């Protein structure tokens, strides 16, 4: 748990714990979107293994698992009727149709965890991004990852080896529509070199965590400082 900010006026200036403000903060909802194949899964996985303060918001989907995908880790894989029931129960922050399947962000315990300073990573498309942003502007940070070119995007989709040529063609068709929403994001990062792209995604997250409005411990801290 985060230490408390200085709580009595007798502390000297050198006693002031300047780290405490970073620890007393509201969590954020960090959205990574991209046209399929541009690398958001790669970047998300790098971030999740490098940064213990952020965890993945696991979406529900009616799409079948790909080889290597694990229930509860990559997605909650649900049937159409289970998805219908969740809509009925108002269990989703947002949901959308993508490539013939449905995807949704379950509310779960996100709201209360944000208050406790937990950050969440969202790998969702622009429709989901818009809906999440409309519901919670103050907590959402939107990052769009672009491929260096459409040729390279196609090479990556083919190289990933998870989709048939028809699916790749439909992903390429959809890529142009996805890219047209680039200006609905706070940050745009080109994934040319994966290390460089990852570094930028980390830098954005670090700066966003330090934003004044997320520092819930700052008001008592400054009050104490001014005594
Ligand atoms: P998305 O989640 O956006 O659909 P992936 O992360 O699955 O994309 O990446 C698609 C493919 O491209 C994967 O095989 C991945 O290893 C590869 N890839 C990702 N980033 C780069 C990069 N900067 N340079 C070359 N290949 C990349
Ligand atoms: P994939 O099938 O490749 O895992 O994902 C296909 C698309 O669905 C991606 O663009 C991904 O960002 C999007 N997606 C995944 N989960 C969600 C979600 O919960 N909501 C929305 N709106 N899109 C999602």
Image (cartoon, rainbow, N blue to C red):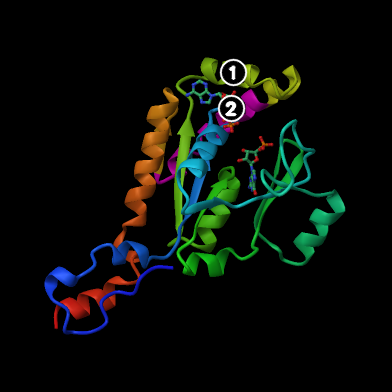
Q: Is residue 68 above or below residue 23?
A: above
Measuring from the top left, give residue 115's x and y in whole percent.
48, 69
For label 2, the residue is: 37
Instruction: Name the one closer to the observer, 190 or 4.
Output: 4
Residue shown at 59%/18% (left/top)?
154
Q: Secondary structure at mark 1?
A: helix
Magenta-span inclusion, residue 143: no
Tell me which image quadrant ligand 1 sits in: top right
Residue shown at 14%/83% (left/top)?
227
Q: Main secondary structure of the magenta part?
A: helix
In the image, 80: left or right of 21? right
Q: Are marks 2 and 1 in contact (CB under 8 Å)?
A: yes
Find residue 84 and name its label.
none
Measuring from the top left, give residue 128's x and y in whole percent.
59, 49
Q: Secondary structure at mark 2?
A: loop
Measuring from the top left, give residue 121's x and y in whole percent.
53, 49
Q: Quadrant of residue 220?
A: bottom left
Q: Is residue 90 above or below residue 174?
A: below
Magenta-span inclusion, residue 177: yes
Q: Is residue 162 above or below residue 136?
A: above
Q: Which residues are magenta?
A: 171-186
For label 1, the residue is: 154
């Amino acid at each position: 748990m985060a230490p408390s900010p200085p709580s009595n006026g007798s502390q000297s200036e050198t006693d002031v714990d300047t780290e405490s403000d970073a620890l007393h903060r509201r969590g954020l909802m960090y959205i990574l979107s991209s046209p399929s194949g541009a690398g958001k899964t790669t970047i998300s996985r790098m971030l999740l293994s490098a940064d213990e303060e952020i965890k993945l918001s696991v979406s529900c989907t009616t799409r079948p698992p790909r080889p290597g995908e694990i229930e509860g880790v990559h997605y909650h894989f649900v049937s159409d009727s289970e998805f219908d029931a969740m809509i009925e129960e108002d269990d989703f922050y947002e949901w959308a149709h993508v490539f013939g399947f449905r995807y949704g962000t379950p509310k779960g315990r996100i709201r209360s965890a944000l208050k406790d300073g937990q950050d969440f990573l969202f790998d969702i498309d622009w429709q989901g991004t818009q809906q999440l942003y409309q519901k919670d502007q103050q907590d959402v940070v939107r990052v769009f990852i672009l491929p260096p070119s459409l040729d390279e995007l196609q090479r990556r989709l083919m190289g990933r080896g998870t989709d048939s040529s028809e699916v790749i063609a439909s992903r390429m068709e959809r890529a142009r529509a996805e890219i047209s929403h680039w200006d609905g994001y706070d940050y745009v990062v080109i994934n040319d070199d994966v290390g460089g792209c990852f570094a930028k995604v980390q830098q954005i997250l670090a700066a966003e965590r330090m934003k004044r409005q997320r520092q819930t411990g700052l008001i008592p801290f400054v009050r104490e400082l001014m005594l």
